[in-house]
Amino acid sequence: MFVYEVDEELTLKMMNTSNAEKLFSLIEHNRDYLQEWLPWVNSTTTVEHSKQFIENAFQTHADRVGLTSGIFYQESLVGVIGFNEFDWRNKIGYIGYWLSKDAQGKGIMTRAARALINYGFEILDLNRIDIRAAVDNKKSRAIPERLGFNQEGILRQTEWLYDHYVDHVVYGMLANEWGI
């Protein structure tokens, strides 16, 4: 099971089904906020959906196709971060994340992303890490920009978000640029 101690306040770890109620509650309390940029929010309507998400995360980890972890700040679940997908042939990891509205402004996501990037390059031996965010999602875009990722382009109409397409900015970091 994946557990990564980031610092004295912050831990990334795989959730288990006992976290399903807390995860669902976090989504429920942030539903309007998360809905702006995350297309899965409307289909997460019960604790069972959160439990299925956690079970799926274990399966994708076992299959080595992804790695999903809860972000625990001062031992409380405040968000999710992970490698949504691995391309092992090309040694690329694709990072995705979200954080509750109340937990923002404390540097949590920047520290969590930095830790996951370190893990990806140092432990998983990835060569490249991508982060993609909607063009207008300034908070999500700030993370790779703050961490020194290169903005590499824009993918047009790459995500269906409820009733419209959104463009994504692609950010990339290579292992030899990260400085490990």
Image (cartoon, rainbow, N blue to C red):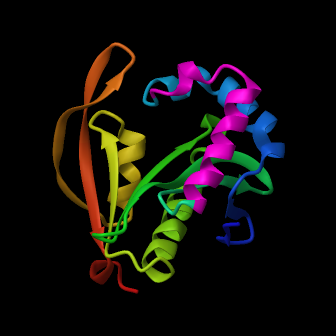
Q: Give the range drawn in magenta.
A: 39-62
Residue found at the very far front of the displayed protein: 63
Residue in the image at 72% along x and 22% along y? 46
* Image position, residue 29 (x, y; %): 69, 25
Residue 106 appears in the rendering: no
118 sits left or right of 45 in the view: left
Residue found at the very far right of the displayed protein: 18
Residue in the image at 36% along x and 40% along y? 138
Q: Is residue 2 above or below residue 83?
A: below
Look at the image and tell me in which quarter the N terminus lies.
bottom right
Residue 145 painted magenta: no
79 sits left or right of 152 in the view: right
Residue found at the very far top of the displayed protein: 163
Q: In this view, does 178 lie above or below 89?
A: below
* Image position, residue 176 (x, y; %): 28, 83
Residue in the image at 17% along x and 43% along y? 154
* Image position, residue 157 (x, y; %): 20, 29
67 sits left or right of 51 in the view: left
* Image position, residue 42 (x, y; %): 55, 19
Residue found at the very far bottom of the displayed protein: 180
Residue 47 painted magenta: yes
